[in-house]
Image (cartoon, helix red, strand yellow):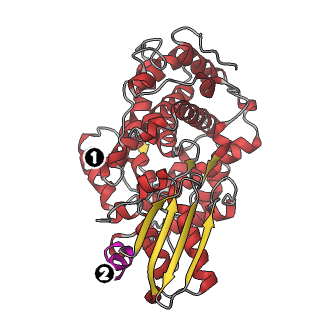
Amino acid sequence: MPAHSDQGPGFVGQALGDFVAGASWQGTGPSLRHEAKRSLLNFFGGALGAARTAEIEAPMRVLRSLSASRQATVIGRAERLDTLSATFVNAISANLLDYDDTHLNTVIHPTAPVAPGVLALAELRGCTGADALHAFILGAEVECRLGNAVSPGHYARGWHITATCGVFGAAAASARLLGLTATQTAHALGIAASQSAGLVVNLSSAAKNVGVGNAARNGVFAALLAEQGCAAAPAAFEGPLGWARVMGDELRLGEVTEGLGTRWEFLKNTYKPYPCGIVLHAVIDACLQLRRDHGLSPDHIIRVTVKGDRLLLARGDRAVANERDARISIHHCVAAVFLFGAAGLLEFSEDTVMQPEVVRFRGLVRAEVDATLPTGAACVTVETADGRTVATTVRAARGSAEAPLSDTEIEAKVRDLSRFGAWPGDLDAMISAAWRIEDAATLQPLMALLALPGT
């Protein structure tokens, strides 16, 4: 679908409404469906790993007292909540450990805002697995395309793009699952535009996850309102006072509509091998390589210099006061690798992050801008007490589009996350059901496998 700058008010909402309401299952080929299943499996792992953490207990205490029904599964837990509340909690848990999927061009984590509402609505309305998978694909595509249309200025300005664009993915997916018309879908997206929020400044706090949870819940709510006849302004996206310009951007229409339904942004989705900010992965890979190739002992290291682009330093050059800080810290990633030879869930846990030796080693790390390095790359130089200097540059980190995780690696990641969360369920059965989701008559069996066993 070509885009033109002279299209009238409401063109974006109309185009996206037509796409979501009119898309055919046959238009999503095997590769796209498979990528969606990889994303969902990765999502399930993240939610199971975080389901019983203190950060999830807090919203559960609030929502248990407010939820009057038990409509939907809370992944990894015994409780059931109403549809909107379960959507909120499942989005938070999937995003909490910074292990979710990433659309690299926008740094959107597509699945956490979109999948929870699809799952909860599918439980509520008895939808098939194929319908749920299709809705998820369409929502994730809308989310990523709108992100492309305002990147990179949107994120650089301080908007947390996973939350601000995630609400549109959630609304689009929910609209499709509810069977809304193209016009109703456009209204759902316009309603979602008034609920788009999330700040980069909150990335190291619980407010970050609340933003992602709200994106998921508010998108579902927008679609349910549109189903009941609520309307939005036609130019809610591209108008002079519409979403894009209020957020500070001109909406690049071509990024939204060109190739819509034939060229899929969601096929560019990637998966993290490390539970931390995606821009830090090249740093970790470089440190692992230096440690392995040069037999570096942490006791002999006197300085580590990390160079990268401005985004790497803007996100990762920070003091560390807790595990949330550590997950977006250059200094902690370096310390974890050289002290422990790994950068996994244990290395980013609170107990590890605040160990005196870890704190000391973080003080040896310096970060510098190198404008010649592309986003996602890093150069690490290590100086030792005996006068050696060794360095390496990683341009395509493990898990990136150039070095993607295999299906087997994603399954292994899910198993690691479930162990971390001490989840006692039948993991083999859950993984098998996730891969076969499009054949399911309903999602009830899969969601039962994701609940705490015995509930």
Pick whichever, 233 or 331, lies toward us.
Answer: 331
Residue for badge 2: 356
The answer to whether residue 164 is visible is: yes
Can you give x and y, in whole percent of width and height, for residue 316 in the image? 42, 58
Tag 2 near tag 1, CB within 8 Å: no
Q: Residue furthest bottom?
A: 386
Can you tell which quarter of the image residue 128 is in? top right
Q: Amino acid at mark 1?
A: Arg
Q: Which contiguous range is marked in magenta?
A: 353-362
| Element marked by disc 2 | helix
Pick whichever, 58 or 278, lies toward us.
Answer: 278
Q: Residue furthest front?
A: 387
Can you tell which quarter of the image residue 233 is in? top left
Q: Is residue 359 magenta?
A: yes
Can you give x and y, in whole percent of width and height, for residue 113 in the image? 47, 41
Can you give x and y, in whole percent of width and height, for residue 133 in the image? 62, 39
Tell which circle, 2 or 1, labels the residue nearer the N-terminal end: 1
Query: Which mark, by number, is residue 64?
Result: 1
Could you classify mark 1 by the number of other residues whose Cα lies within 10 Å: few (under 14), some (14-19), or many (20 or more)? some
